[in-house]
Image (cartoon, helix red, strand yellow):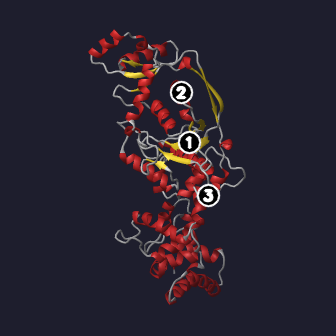
Amino acid sequence: MSANQKDSGVRVRFAPSPTGPLHIGGARSALFNYVFARQNQGKFIVRMEDTDLERSYPESEANILSSLKWLGIDWDEGVDVGGPYAPYRQTERINTYRPYVLRLLNEGKAYPCYCTEEELEAERQELISRGETPRYLGKCSRLTADEREAREREGRKAAIRFRVPPLHTLVVDDLVRGRVTFETETIGDFIIIKSDGIPVYNFAVVIDDSLMKITHVIRGEEHLSNTPRQLLLYEALGLKPPSFAHISLILGADRTKMSKRHGATSVVAYQENGFLPEALVNFLSLLGWSPPGEQEIFGMKELIEQFSLDRVAKNPAVFDSDKLRWINGSYIRQSTTERLVELAVPYLKEAGLLKQTDQTGDAHWISLLVEATRERLGTMREIADEARVFIGTRVEPENDEAAAILEEETVPRMIKAFRQLITDADAIEVEWTRTMLKQLGKETKLAGRKLFMPLRVALTGRTHGVELYYAIPLLGRENCLARTRRWQ
């Protein structure tokens, strides 16, 4: 936020559970929150909801933060930068929740529950067998003080359940989905503190959002079912709820929920596979949001200017991998050669095309490779496959069609003339090659397909590929002479 912009009071947060790498769906939620905050001169907070002790890991938290930074998303308050409402990890806020639990207990709005997992499962199965919605029927809500004491003497540890008021209608004026109503009859008393003393998500999130003055909660549609429980807690504690906006699910091409069987699902996987951060941001913004015009390629600045919750769709968004590659290819073509060289080096080394001890390889050769292939790339990882054709002294025609081209009667004299020009060259560079190809045409009186197709096949084994004026310098004199010897 610039110095002359006044804080609007808008406060949004991205609050992932650090149980794995940042998922594409989470990245989109973070992006929409970030853009909304920046557009409204508000604050964007990153908070970790790490009360799932068995599945939360510091490595996952680090991955989430680094993935956000890679995407170009920064934050005003959070686990690593602090802020006026610190700490920003739920496990470090356990004492913060206790006064609210005691208040609910003292007011009779919550009660200890001693039911075992076996008892709860039996109740659940009974409701299912009767065709009813599985829910807690309030067995422990009617215990006397003596009955509670008896259970504690048995060594049972109590969870704390919220007492859901009966015959109560809850209304959410969702900024994306419109008015949504819920009836409490289908909810059942729900746990707010587990028997180990750790608060559950629906309870902790209400306290955290209230204390951190969150004004808007922008999150995935899968959280819509949590909203009535959270509204009940806001009401019971006399707290003002934020405005809610539930954005649509992301589906795979088969219109089922996005999962690993559809391909990569984490941000780091897309980073490793050669996608550019600005391309992924551009693509994610179009998953469920429509820009006001026809433009599909735009940067973060334009996204912040154009974004509106009014244009976020209710219908699920379909993850189109081909469109992502197309967008990524557009950004590759817009990027500087220097940047693409830096991005290409790891993939070339991984493929064994550069010396592992050399951080850059032949910088000039890589720059030329980038220039030659950038129009063909959908991801930077693909540059390794493009590079392989230029490595080695021998190549075979890729198929019968290519082999047949080299059987044409004009091929030997064309190859002989080419080899002589290559041998006599002082340096084989792009501009020299352009001139040489024209000279080759004059000397052999060949042009078009008769000249360029057999030369391409003899040099690369392929009928399609990068322009010959790039391919020949990439191969170099030695490879050009070695690969064409058999065809002269």
At horizontal 53% and vertical 27% (from top left) the residue drawn is 238
Please state which amino acid type lies under the numbered disc 1: Gly
Q: Is residue 47 above or below residue 346?
A: above
Q: Residue furthest right?
A: 293
Q: Is residue 136 left or right of residue 293?
A: left
Residue 39 visible in the displayed image? yes
Q: Nearer the viewer, residue 3 or 224?
A: 3
* x and y, in percent, of residue 373 in the image: 55, 68
> Percent position (x, y) of residue 398?
51, 65
Number of other residues with Cα within 10 Å of mark 2, as a class: few under 14, some 14 to 19, many 20 or more: few
Q: Is residue 477 placed above or below 93 in the rendered structure?
A: below
Q: Earlier in the sequence, mark 1 or mark 2?
A: 2
Q: Indicate which disc, 3 or 2, sits on the residue closer to the N terminus.
A: 3
Image position of 421 with respect to 327: above or below = below
Q: Marks 1/2: CA distance?
A: 41 Å
Report whether residue 406 is seen.
no
Tell me which numbered mark, 3 or 1, is placed earlier along the sequence: 3
Q: Which residue is mark 1?
A: 252
Say whether marks 3 and 1 touch (CB < 8 Å): no
Distance from the alpha carbon under mark 3 to that under mark 1: 43 Å
The residue at 68%/43% (across/down) is 311
Dot 1 falls on a residue whose secondary structure is loop
Q: Which residue is mark 2?
A: 238
